[in-house]
Amino acid sequence: MTEMQPSSDAHRTFSDGWGRWLNRNALGVLVVAVGLSLLSLVAFYQFGALNSDLSKLIKPSDSLTWYQDNEEYKAAFPQFQQTAVIVVRGSQYSRVQDYVRGLVGQLSQDKLGTPFAPGIDPFLERHKLYFLSQAQLDQWLKGANYNQGTLLRLMDEASLANALFTYADFVSANPGQVLPVSLETLVQGLLTGKLDLRSHYPLEPPGDEFIEVVVINAEQQLSDALPNAAIVGSIQRAIAEYPPPTDVDVAITGEVALAHEEMSAALSGVELAGLLSLVFLGLILHLGIRSGRILMAIAGTLAMGICLTLGFATLVVGELNTLSMIFVVLFFGLGVDFAAHFSLRAQANLSGGLIQSSTQSLTQALTQALKDTGPALVLCTLTSAASFLAFLPTAYRGFAELGIISAGGIVIALLLTVSVLPAVLLRWPPAPQDPDRKMLITPLLRRLRRAVDRLSNLAVAGFFVAVFLLALNLAKEVGFDYSVLAMRDADSPAMRALLDLQRDQLTTDYSVHVLAGDAEAAAELKTRLLALPSVGAVTTPGDFVPKNQPAKQARLAQQQLLVQDMEAPEFSPATDPESLALALEYLEEVVAELEGRSAQDAGQVLEAALRLAQSPTQRLAFEQQFAQQLRESLADLKRLLTAQPFALADVPEHFRSRLVAPDGRHLMSVNPAQKLNDRQATDAFIAEVAATAPNAAGRSVVEWGIGAVVVEAFQQATAMAFATIFLLLLLYFRNWIFPLLVLTPIAMTVVLTFAVCVLFGISLNMANILMVPLILGLGVDTGIHIVHRYRQAQIGAPAMDPAIRRAVLISGLTTIGTFCSLSLSPHQGAASIGLLLTVAISLLLVISLVLLPVLLNWFAPARS
């Protein structure tokens, strides 16, 4: 092929005409650009949206089996989608239960729908005795018999006098013996002033910690920047208005809370990265350009570009997801790249003696800069856009949207660079400066450049080849972690709560769900699943139907005969002073007869009773509570003893609908034996369960399947991007040597970055895997500018002159600065992108400035 001239006659004619037109219409260009920018910003705030649903980042093919199974599960149990889960923990079962009851009442007032709290469900509470094992039931009935005599005594009269007589009789006859539960709770209420009378021993599961969950389904506000903020805010407000006791902990998790944390972290990360990027950009550009007016022109161009790209995203895509939001940081890198190359070339033309006319020097300098950089800028726009759009035909919707927005952004950056940037400089001309004296660290850079130039070309090439081969061997070991949990902060409140639930082997959003045809199929499959090493627990609808119910009913019927005729006394405000005085005198005599701890405890009861007796108002309130709680507690005991055996069909619909689908299929929940916050554990769990239960579904299975989709999309997009960029370079340079030289630093950078990942134990994930097409989109610009200027050198211009070196260095440093700021984001996915791109662009900058000139001299030597 014959080489195309770097600057054709048509391009020169267009550049001359464009420069003259801008000189006449600079103010109009600025007015139109500012107006469109403001209009775009208003459109984004009015019509733009943020999508925090990570499941929407991928659109798998409907033909995939795991996808079909999950869609079937979602259709059968829609109430499990987009839920918030409140986790209540405590060391005392009764306090946890009481708090959950109060919190549910508070939540019901906050328009959050009907909270589902299985631990306090009335049906389950009424049948609690049937859920006890035979040994546990025997122990409870033994306690009921022990408490029977005390309960009968208390039924005589709901008065302080009767309570004291009953207590004195018991401790007198049984010194040092544990008080029956009714008497113990009565005495505790007397001592503390907070009566909580119990007619039976509490029914609580074994263990030192007790957990209850409250599940909430509420509608997202998709029009808000944070769609789940209203739900999470309402829950937090309810907890604040009904705070837990000191020994009870409350946490919020579930997909709603996790997505809210995800989007909040993404937004705050973009804000932080944007702010730090501005600081880095300002510092680097100041050191590299040293012209306040050029800096202001670049800053104005970047601000307009962000606004216009937001408007473009609103018009074309309609919403931003947690990945596409990083286009703001990308635009800083892309926009500065174009602006730096153009403005530094214009500054070099203005200051280097190329333009002599005093009246037209600036216009001619800008026009010449457009002639020098225009073709390269257009080619960079096309190649970068091709790289960003490579994900468009794939199933990776999250990056496809980022690609569309970034492709539009780079076109906007080009248009602003050749219109608004020169228009600003024409209105506020910068002073000419010597390009060799712009940077404060110029002497250091000169010494560094001379040291590199003194190196043997063969030694430089040999070093990079050796490093590349070593990195290639390491890069083969790079891993991919498909879990969305890997992109989330493990120390965030919602993630900690989720991982704690997984540790306790409780059903969560990341449990695997299986649909079994009926009860028999579910029971048989449960046996096989529990034999798997990675499975910790399996629950089926059949587990909610207790075993041996007829035998338990017979035992309860015997106890029920003892209490069926009991009647709680009515409250009577009229009290007998003589009776209370006798009770106090009797208790005083008993205290005198007791010894040790028994005497001490009874003395405290006597003191509390004397204080209460001296306050008629407090005594009256105590006796009123005594009568009310005695009546409620007795009724609760009778309900427990008279509850009938039940089958699954007897379970209320609001509960059964979470166990059995409308078509009769049974829902099984399979929980892992360990936390699923790394790929190895998730792989083992999903693979074993899926092999045993082919229709496994749930978020873990979806992410497992999506991992393969992402890898395929990544491979497809990378191959398409390389091919498209190579074709564009081939069409522009008209030979195959220059395209290969442009792509060589990029290929080396990708391999070296993968090797760094392996060395430091960094896995690729659903976010940072887009590093490769981003390296292509960002890195190809550097190679194009160097090769483009090198080709200009072949027809008389100085090769690797100070302007192109400084432009490449400044552009690279600003890009590194923007991605370094992104690596500080609280959003783990965005932070991993920023970290790897910081490493990648640093490597690319070194390779491009050190190795690429050597390769150009070897494979495309300059002509005389």
Image (cartoon, grey):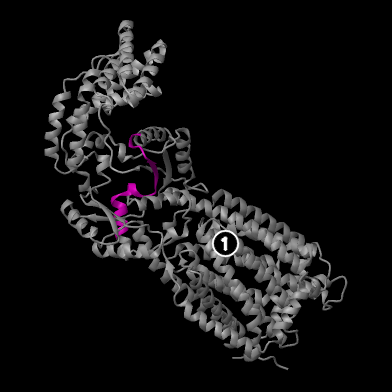
Residue 245, magenta (yes or no): no
Few, some or many residues within 10 Å of mark 1 (<14, 14–19, 20+)? many
**Residue depicted at x 34% and y 50%:** 504
Q: Where 784 sits versus 570, above or below?
A: below
**Residue depicted at x 16% and y 34%:** 644
Amino acid of disc 1: Ser
* Viewer can see residue 192: yes
Q: Which residues are magenta?
A: 69-94
Pinpoint residue 368: horizontal percent, then vertical percent: 76, 76
Q: Where 111 sits versus 861, above or below?
A: above
> Which of the pair 594/568 is nearer the observer?
594
> Which of the pair 333/199 is nearer the observer?
199
Residue labelled with disc 1: 823
Q: Is residue 380 left or right of residue 718?
A: right
Pinpoint residue 796: horizontal percent, then vertical percent: 75, 87
Pinpoint residue 418: horizontal percent, then vertical percent: 70, 68
**Residue depicted at x 13% and y 34%:** 555
Q: How many numbered marks does the figure carry? A: 1
> Which of the pair 593/778 is nearer the observer?
593
Quadrant in the picture for the C terminus = bottom right
Q: Quadrant of residue 30?
A: bottom right
Residue 89, magenta (yes or no): yes
